[in-house]
Amino acid sequence: MLTRRALLKNSVLTAAAAGFPSIIPGTALGLNGRPAASERITMAAFGFGTIAYTTVPAFLQDERVQIVAVADPVSELGNYGYSAEKTGGRLVGKALIEKHYTGAKDGSFKGCTAYEDFRELLAKEDIDAVNVSAPDHWHAYMAIYCAQKGKHIYGQKPLALTVGEGRRMVEEVKKAGITWQTGSQQRSDLKFRMAAGYVRNGRLGKITEVRIGLPAGHTNWSKLAERKAPEAAPKELNWDLWLGPAPQRDYSPALLQLNWRHNYDFSGGMITDWGAHHMDIAQWALDMDTSGPVAIENIKGELPAKGDLYNTATAFHFEAVYANGTRMIVDSSFREGIEFTGDNGKKIFVKRDLIEFTPQELRREQIKPEEIQLHLSKKYNHNLDFVDHVYDGGATAAPIEASHRAISIAHLANLGLRLGKSTLKWDPVTEQSNDAEINAQLTRPMRAPYAI
């Protein structure tokens, strides 16, 4: 009899050949309680710091998952997250994972192996799925590499570093027939689902305007921002591997940890960091998961002095215009969150800890069973939603195409800012601009030998 894991692997191969995902439901195998070791989804964690402190424990709590390995170019290093007191790296991840599993009563726990390079991990370990919590510049390489090996992927936002990388990722995931979930966890949140559901079901009439407030400036998460000059890399860090596909440069403590988000070689600043969340929800509500705006207008902002290590925008404004006339206005001076305004004068404002209705009685309206029902994650749990659909082959809360379309808006705005373009046209079908200079930078070369 085939084990659950053998069925998982066979179904990926079958799905890839047929062009669609087809996973045997766990219920068909009579799984009750904690599955036997042979029936669980084995997972590896790529990167352990910042967001992995949230995602890895979430997967550890799911008894259908067994995390057996972790990979990170860092062995163990401080200043590794939103709090400068955090320590991260593969040894920290290994210790956390092993501490959790030491309570296993069925004798199945055999330890967690730490690797410096995720490619060595994949060559040696029998893995069904991966949790990618690496910096943005690694997202495309890791996703494509894993998709081509038939691994199911929980990949962090923002999806990719460029529009071109995102499109390549979408095609590789589709071709492989694997399950993908982007870590855009707001799609599994009740408040955001409610706001998007009201919009999709016409409670505001036609949406005329969406206002999105994103953070400004450069946050010094690691408390190392003043150390921008090159230094010798610490022994705990394989700097060349950490750089990976990004351009070669000397190590600077100000880039680690997390502050790399403010350098364009590795990320896109607050426009991509928070834009990946809020513009994703706006696109979801506007039913634009497979499309996007036709123009980006009124692009303006403030960029640091040329040569500054932190070279992403510190203040910004841009407007995404859709074919039906809806205008999505993104501004770093707006109240943080998303506000939808309809032509009937009604409004909804939503952010992570708040949802407001104008007028207030709008809140009392319910979405009826016969109306549009948006994706509902069980227990409003984004990680659980991913595992559910590895098992059943269904669509996840944050599919890769939707994530690509949302972050493409951020990439176009960044390109406009950096190239001095106040307006650009965009064809969401061909994913090309009317501006040759913009089109030339929709993708970037990857550094050898890390190109894929």
Image: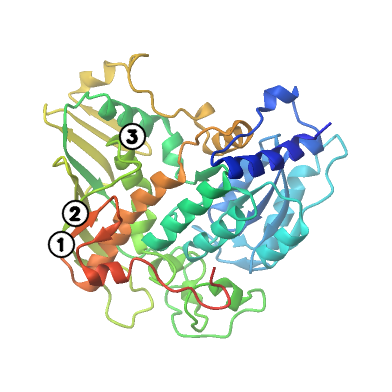
Neighbour tally class for label 1: few under 14, some 14-19, many 20 plus, Cα within 10 Å: some
Report the Cα–Cα distance between label 1 and label 3.
33 Å
Percent from the top left, x then y, of residue 119?
A: 67, 64
- Type of residue at label 1? Thr
Q: Nearer the viewer, mark 1 or mark 3?
A: 1
Image quadrant in which the N terminus is located: top right
Which residue is tagged 3?
Answer: 354
Marks 1 and 2 sit apart, C-alpha to C-alpha, by 7 Å
Residue 233, can we see it?
A: yes
Characterize the local packing of mark 3: few (<14), some (14-19) or many (20 or more) Cα atoms within 10 angstroms: few
| Residue 113 or residue 20, whichever sits in front | 20
360 relative to 17, above or below? above
At mark 1, the secondary structure is: loop
Element on which disc 2 rests: strand
**Contact (Cβ within 8 Å) of mark 2 with mark 3:** no
Residue at (25%, 46%) from the top-left corner?
212
Furthest toward the right, the residue is 107
In this view, the residue farthest toward the top is 369
Q: Residues within 10 Å of mark 2 (few under 14, many from 20)?
A: many
Residue 381's disc number = none
From the image, tell me which residue sits under label 2: 295
What is the x, y in percent for residue 290? 35, 43
Q: Amino acid at mark 2?
A: Ala
Q: Which residue is mark 1?
A: 423
Mark toward the start of the polypeptide (1 vs 3): 3
Q: Relative to residue 309, is residue 356 drawn left or right?
A: left
Tell me what residue is drawn at x 50 percent, y 82 percent: 248
Q: From the image, which quarter does the C terminus lie in?
A: bottom right
Q: Looking at the picture, which amino acid does disc 3 mark?
A: Leu
